[in-house]
Amino acid sequence: MKIAQRLRRRILSVSSLVVATAALAQPPRGGGPAPAPAPPAVQAPAPQPGPGPAPQGPAPAPVQEIAPRTGLGSPLGGLTDAQLAAFLDGRADFRTAETVAGGLGPIFNDVSCVACHDAGGTGGASRRTVTRFGRTVNGVFDPLDAQGGSLLQERSINPGIREVVPREANTVARRVTTPLFGAGLIEAIPDSTIVRGTLERKPAGIAGKVSVVQDPVSGQNRVGRFGWKAQQATLLAFSGDAYVNEMGITNRFFPAENAPNGNAALLARFDRVAEVEDEVSAIDGKADIDRAADFMRLLAPPPRGPATPSAVAGAAIFARLDCAVCHTPAMTTGRHAIAALSEKTVGLYSDLLLHDMGALGDGIAQGTAGARDMRTAPLWGLRSRPTWLHDGRANTIDQAVRGHAGEAQHSRDRYVALSPAERQQVLDFLNTL
């Protein structure tokens, strides 16, 4: 079944490449640059029936197309035909619903990547959240690994094995899905560039530290940059982590299945697909996690909005408030085998460091990140997000700014003290990102 699905996706991706290449060959109208092509949709197949009852929990979110108005979800410019084919093939996998027969579960959070990454276009953020839990005693966090922590898988292939937050847990947090636009550019920023951010002089009260993680792909210690705690350093590791923890699909980097609340007997009873479930294909030498990583790596960054006089004034105020100390406007990628990623300016508005956010922290310690530490969220694409802050508590950008604490408290207080006109200028600037 997996092989048939892959062949079908390859055929659809080649067809999409022909259409996209033809669109790129058309001259622009009106003297302006040609918009990024919107390749035809690849319909995600419905999950096929597998052994046992149907998966329990909320229905998966519908697939949303690339937004023509913003271009979100489009490929990077300047890709070769082979790279564009990899993007389209990866996008097809990103949208495909996994099945029980193909290894979904036995516990999971959703059936596809796009189910949680769809705001504005495939690869975006969403209102979807996941639950993290653990037990904190005298300031020491225990992820309760033996009871399935710290990530709760909220759905299952059988209602009798659904996970619950253990009674011992006294720390529970929600995290919203992070957007992936421009992720390949972020991956291509050298570790040394991020480390250098810790050495630069900062205003009193602001520090920042590097998240050091062991990259399962290379086996080396690398600088983390993906996830709310900067817990992954590369997109292939990020992909493999998401497949096993969000969909229950084991892979060559994460071969161990999650047991329902740590119950190995239940896992043995309901895990009917032999590991490793995401096999490398003889067709192209890739597994699904590789294709998903290709898609994320080749996603274009979000386009900027027009720089109105108010927005320009707001950018100056943003810097004056020291917001740009952590939300660093730009970094530069290193040399890269993919020309579209090589030595490019990345206008991400983040230093990719961990900062002590005080009361805004989620209480979950993860790797190098302490309970109050959070990675500086990149601000590009801010206007495309449905909610803001790590748990989605902010329904407006103004609420998100006012929710800052810890190392950001002084900047937050200075923002609140601005005149209404100046605050609006800052918001006008943020709405160009």
Image (cartoon, helix red, strand yellow):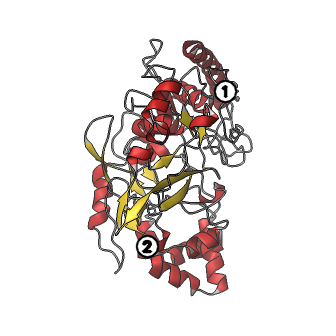
**Toward the viewer: 390 or 136?**
136
Q: Please, is residue 287 above or below residue 417 in the view?
A: above
- Judge depth for marks 1 and 2 and give the one in front: 1
Query: How many numbered discs sit on the rendered protein?
Result: 2
Q: Residue furthest right?
A: 30
Q: Mark 1 — residue?
A: 53
Circle nearer the N terminus (1, 2) = 1
Spot occupied by residue 198 in the image (x, y as percentages of width and height): 29, 64
Spot occupied by residue 254 in the image (x, y as percentages of width and height): 39, 33
Q: Residue at x 39, y 31 (%)?
A: 256
Relative horizontal placement of residue 29, taking residue 304 as reference (left or right): right
Q: Please, is residue 15 above or below residue 180 in the view?
A: above
**Residue 321, can we see it?**
no
**Residue 387, can we see it?**
yes
Q: Residue at x 39, y 45 (%)?
A: 146
Q: Mark 2 — residue?
A: 358
Relative horizontal placement of residue 296, taking residue 223 as reference (left or right): right
